[in-house]
Amino acid sequence: VQLQAFGGGLVQAGGSLRLSCAASGRTFSYYNMGWFRQTPGKEREFVAGISRSGGSPYYGESVKGRFTISGDNEKNTAYLQMNSLKFEDTAVYYCAVFSRAYYTTDYRAYNYWGQGTLVTVSS
């Protein structure tokens, strides 16, 4: 599967952005999917994700109540709606998938990654 993340940009604090992750090859429903973010010098941080088996989505503590993950199976695309953005949300955002039977928020389990899209929140 190939992943392409896009939709990043510059936004003022309090504003919103929607990131997209388009998959080619196998459909998203085959995979566990996650959004991660990273800033220089820091470890990749889990943001949001969906298990291949369904159920409620997962969110990192810092984005709960502000970010929403969703997907469109027909378009084979996942989305990350980001509202009430804060300066500390500034990062490169990545989408990623892996195909094991369990779900994890540990980025090391994910073996397919998109190229990343930069989100910059001005204070």
Image (spheres, rainbow, N blue to C red):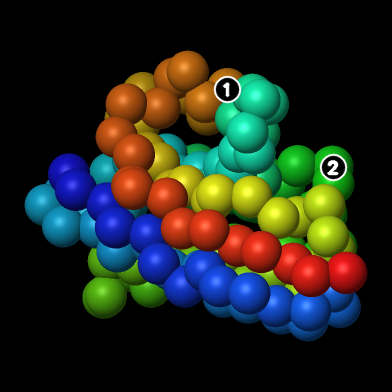
Residue 28 versus residue 9 in the image, above or below: above
The image shows residue 114 at horizontal and vertical percentages of: 33, 47
Q: Identify the secondary structure beneath mark 1.
A: loop
Quadrant position of residue 58: top right
The percent coordinates of residue 118 (x first, y second) are: 53, 58
When the figure is inspected, residue 45 is found, relative to residue 120, above or below; the finding is: above
What residue do we see at 66% from left, 25% from top?
Answer: 41
Nearer to the camera, 87 or 24: 87
Residue 32: x, y in percent? 42, 39
Residue pointed to by mark 1: 106
Q: Which residue does the image show at 58% across and 22% down from the upper left?
A: 106
Where 42 falls versus 17 (above or below)? above
- Label 2 to label 1: alpha-carbon separation: 14 Å
Amino acid type, label 1: Asp
Q: Residue furthest top?
A: 108
Q: Where, quadrant-wise, is the N terminus in this rendering?
A: top left
- The amino acid beneath tag 2 is Glu
Which residue is denoted by mark 2 in the rendering? 61
Q: Secondary structure at mark 2?
A: loop
Determine whether label 2 and label 1 are within 8 Å by CB: no
**Residue 94, image x, y percentages:** 47, 47
